[in-house]
């Protein structure tokens, strides 16, 4: 599956949406992994993965991609960056929570806890900046 870089225009400047590209890449990898598992003899789609956690992360990713796709650019690169990064961080919180709820690796659970703390702090910083710059 080929992923192409999306471009959009903010205030007359062309910008690459590498965040959107990264999310799409993650989607492609997830879809490919699910398809591979489904194609193995005797295996069902999603088998071999923690279905509940993997499904929750996949749903979070799809919901987040939809939110970012539906966002109408304001024409102010700083505001759009803050809004999209906040959405991205909110997705990270949901994915990290799915890891805590369903993951088995102590190392990944520790990473998820660090992500939650860091992302909550950054979300608050984005919220603060957006309040100052309505």
Image (spheres, rainbow, N blue to C red):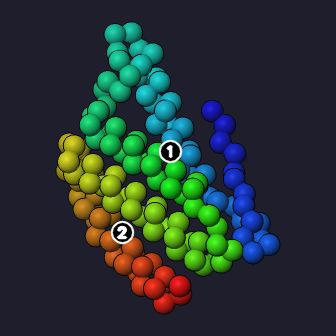
Circles 1 and 2: CB distance less than 8 Å? no
The residue positioned farthest toward the top in the image shown: 41
Q: CA distance from mark 1 to mark 2?
A: 19 Å
Residue 83's spot in the image, x, y percent?
A: 51, 70
Residue at position x 23%, y 44% from top? 103
Where, by quadrant of the figure, is residue 15 drawn? bottom right
Residue at position x 46%, y 53% from top? 64
The residue positioned farthest toward the bottom in the image shown: 132
Q: How many marks?
A: 2
Determine if residue 107 is in view.
Answer: no
Residue 27's spot in the image, x, y percent?
A: 51, 41
- Circle number at residue 1: none
Q: Nearer the viewer, residue 108 or 7?
A: 7
Residue at position x 39%, y 9% from top? 41
Determine if residue 63 is in view.
Answer: yes
Can you identify the residue that label 2 sits on?
119
Q: Is residue 78 above or below residue 115?
A: below
Which quarter of the figure is the N terminus placed in? Answer: top right
Q: Secondary structure at mark 1?
A: helix
Q: Nearer the viewer, residue 61 or 67?
A: 67
Who comes first in sequence, dot 1 or dot 2? 1
The 10 Å Cα crowd at callout 2, few under 14, some 14 to 19, many 20 or more, is: some
Residue at position x 75%, y 75% from top? 11
Can you identify the residue that label 1 sits on?
26
């Amino acid at each position: 599956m080929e992923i192409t870089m999306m471009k959009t225009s903010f205030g007359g400047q062309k910008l690459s949406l590498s965040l959107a590209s990264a999310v799409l890449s993650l989607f492609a990898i997830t879809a490919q992994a699910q398809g591979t598992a489904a194609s193995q003899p005797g295996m069902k789609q999603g088998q071999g993965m923690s279905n509940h956690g993997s499904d929750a992360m996949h749903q979070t990713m799809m919901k987040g991609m939809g939110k970012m796709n539906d966002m109408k650019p304001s024409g102010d690169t700083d505001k759009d960056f803050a809004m999209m990064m906040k959405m991205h961080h909110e997705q990270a919180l949901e994915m990290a929570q799915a890891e805590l709820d369903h993951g088995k690796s102590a190392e990944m659970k520790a990473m998820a806890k660090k992500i939650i703390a860091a992302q909550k702090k950054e979300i608050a910083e984005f919220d603060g900046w957006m309040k100052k710059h309505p």
